[in-house]
Image (cartoon, grey):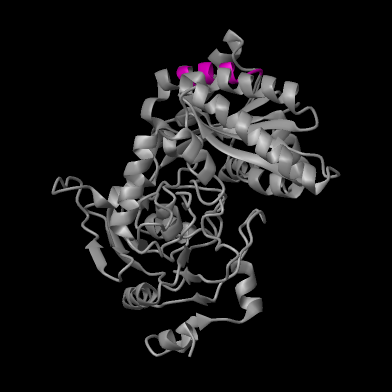
């Protein structure tokens, strides 16, 4: 009798999927860079079934890889090639459990699609501000497990700033009922802070209680053409003086990325008269409908033009135009995927260091990797810059692998020189375990391993992700 036969006696057999065709899409990450094997795909319908699965996994020492919408960019939801693990899909735990408009909270299960949570908040006249390019398919459990960021971090913070309470299941099957909607809770260690961003290596998230915010009644969106990242920071400084906390998003993109997006993603158009070396995407929002944000943004951009900080700008005159502008930003990941092989990085440095950091990467790329194109896009308002090295399609596969390792080493060395992080919002996953080992303080790594041991003493939860296996 196989171990799966024992599981079939514990949960609905229909929740255990072994059909190769059904399994196949779950065995490869979104970028197609990681591919593994699994005993089965498990699809529980309740927290109780998740608990039962983990008790069984502990008893049989079966590795468990939690998986949400499978939109991650670091391979953290892909099993290894051994075929010993089971994939645990939370997709069927997809209820909005509660919305409290007096306390401004929303409780959602792990399988809820992010866009559906946004819509549920909006239907209650509230804003759930987390916004990502994959929001139409990524799931709540995944965004919690990776401490996702997105375009609104400059104003609302990452997922860690949005979560008030967390329900999760330990490796031994114990359910931790922590969905308290409390703004202040100083009782003991902040365990949920450890689970958030742990990428399924400490526990399986089954539900979360989030903060909600007043729904914006006024907004203004613009796309700006700039000469340099330094000008982008000058523009951000000008904007902060006038708009303050009403700045919801401030994104940066180089012209190379803009060109790929315009060429490779249907439905993208540039609302400026000409191309520029750099672009800034701006979104202002306010709950006061009488706040004339369009006029405010126009004044700031006019001042920036007078100062030579800005070269051109297009201010959206309708929601449709605003969506067209943001489509350019959200389509970048798809454009890069269609462009071919690339070596991508999710780095962060101090906001003031962004221009010097980009210059250092450009100089390194020109000197060391003439066959590759250095591209940049990111959340400049919080120092999160995605560095993408695009490699020619005709480069031999063996050369690609060598180039990838060499590029990573150079980029991460520059990140370390700036005191930055090798990952800002995508997580370590399986892609960056070596980088974490190399660049993290050894004493900090020891603490991380001790935390892993405390939560998952048998090492069955997403083995090989985040911390390199010894």
Q: Which residues are magenta?
A: 227-237
Residue extending furthest toward the left = 187
Whether residue 190 is in magenta: the answer is no
Q: In front: 57, or 300?
A: 57
Q: Is residue 388 visible?
A: no
Q: Quadrant of residue 228?
A: top right
Residue extending furthest toward the right = 394
Q: Is residue 292 left or right of residue 210?
A: right
Q: Is residue 165 left or right of residue 205?
A: left
Whether residue 232 is in magenta: the answer is yes
Q: In front: 229, or 12?
A: 12
Q: Position of residue 266 (x, y in %)?
A: 75, 50
| Rendered residue at 23%/64% (across/down) | 177
Q: Is residue 6 visible?
A: yes
Up/down of 178 relative to 231, above or below: below
Q: Position of residue 79 (x, y in %)?
A: 55, 63
The number of numbered discs placed on residues in the rendered structure image is 0
| Rendered residue at 50%/36% (across/down) | 438
Q: Is residue 187 left or right of residue 268?
A: left
Residue extending furthest toward the top = 307
Q: In front: 167, or 274?
A: 167
Q: Is residue 47 left or right of residue 262?
A: left
**Helix, strand or loop: magenta stretch:** helix
Q: In front: 16, or 85?
A: 85
Up/down of 346 relative to 57, above or below: above
Q: Position of residue 365 (x, y in %)?
A: 71, 26
Q: Position of residue 318 (x, y in %)?
A: 57, 41
| Rendered residue at 48%/27% (across/down) | 349
């Amino acid at each position: 009798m196989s171990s799966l036969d024992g599981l079939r006696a514990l949960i609905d057999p229909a929740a255990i999927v072994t059909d190769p065709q059904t399994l196949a899409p779950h065995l490869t990450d979104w970028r197609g860079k990681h591919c593994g094997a699994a005993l089965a795909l498990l699809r529980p319908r309740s927290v109780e079934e998740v608990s039962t699965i983990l008790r069984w996994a502990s008893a049989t020492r079966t590795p468990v890889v939690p998986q949400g919408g499978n939109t991650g960019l670091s391979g953290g939801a892909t099993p290894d090639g051994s075929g010993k693990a089971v994939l645990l899909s939370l997709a069927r735990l997809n209820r909005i459990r509660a919305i409290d408009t007096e306390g401004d909270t929303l409780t959602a299960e792990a399988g809820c699609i992010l866009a559906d949570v946004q819509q549920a908040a909006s239907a209650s006249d509230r804003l759930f501000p987390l916004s990502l390019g994959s929001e139409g398919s990524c799931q709540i459990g995944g965004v919690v497990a990776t401490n996702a960021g997105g375009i609104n971090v400059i104003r609302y913070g990452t997922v860690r700033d949005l979560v008030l309470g967390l329900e999760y299941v330990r490796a031994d099957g114990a359910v931790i009922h922590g969905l308290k909607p409390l703004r202040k809770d100083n009782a003991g260690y902040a365990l949920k802070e450890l689970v958030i961003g742990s990428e399924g290596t400490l526990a399986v998230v089954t539900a979360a209680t989030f903060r909600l915010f007043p729904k914006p009644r006024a907004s203004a969106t613009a796309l700006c053409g700039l000469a340099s990242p330094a000008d982008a920071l000058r523009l951000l400084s000008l904007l902060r003086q006038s708009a303050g906390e009403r700045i919801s998003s401030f994104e940066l993109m180089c012209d190379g990325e803009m060109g790929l997006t315009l060429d490779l993603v249907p439905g993208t158009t540039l609302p400026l008269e000409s191309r520029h070396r750099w672009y800034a995407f701006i979104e202002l929002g306010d709950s006061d409908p009488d706040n004339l944000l369009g006029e405010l943004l126009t004044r700031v951009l006019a001042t920036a033009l007078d100062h030579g900080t800005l070269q051109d700008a297009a201010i959206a005159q309708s929601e449709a135009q605003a969506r067209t502008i943001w489509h350019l930003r959200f389509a970048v990941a798809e454009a890069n995927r269609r462009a071919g092989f690339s070596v991508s990085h999710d780095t962060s440095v101090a906001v003031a260091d962004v221009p010097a950091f980009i210059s250092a990467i450009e100089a390194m790329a020109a000197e060391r990797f003439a066959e590759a194109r250095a591209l940049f896009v990111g959340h400049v308002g919080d120092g999160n810059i995605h560095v993408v090295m695009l490699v020619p399609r005709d480069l031999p596969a063996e050369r690609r692998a060598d180039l990838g390792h060499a590029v990573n080493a150079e980029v991460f060395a520059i990140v370390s020189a700036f005191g930055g992080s090798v990952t800002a919002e995508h997580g370590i996953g399986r892609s960056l375990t070596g980088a974490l080992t190399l660049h993290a303080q050894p004493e900090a790594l020891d603490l991380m391993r001790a935390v892993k041991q405390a939560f998952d003493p048998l090492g069955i939860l997403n083995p090989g992700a985040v911390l390199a296996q010894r």
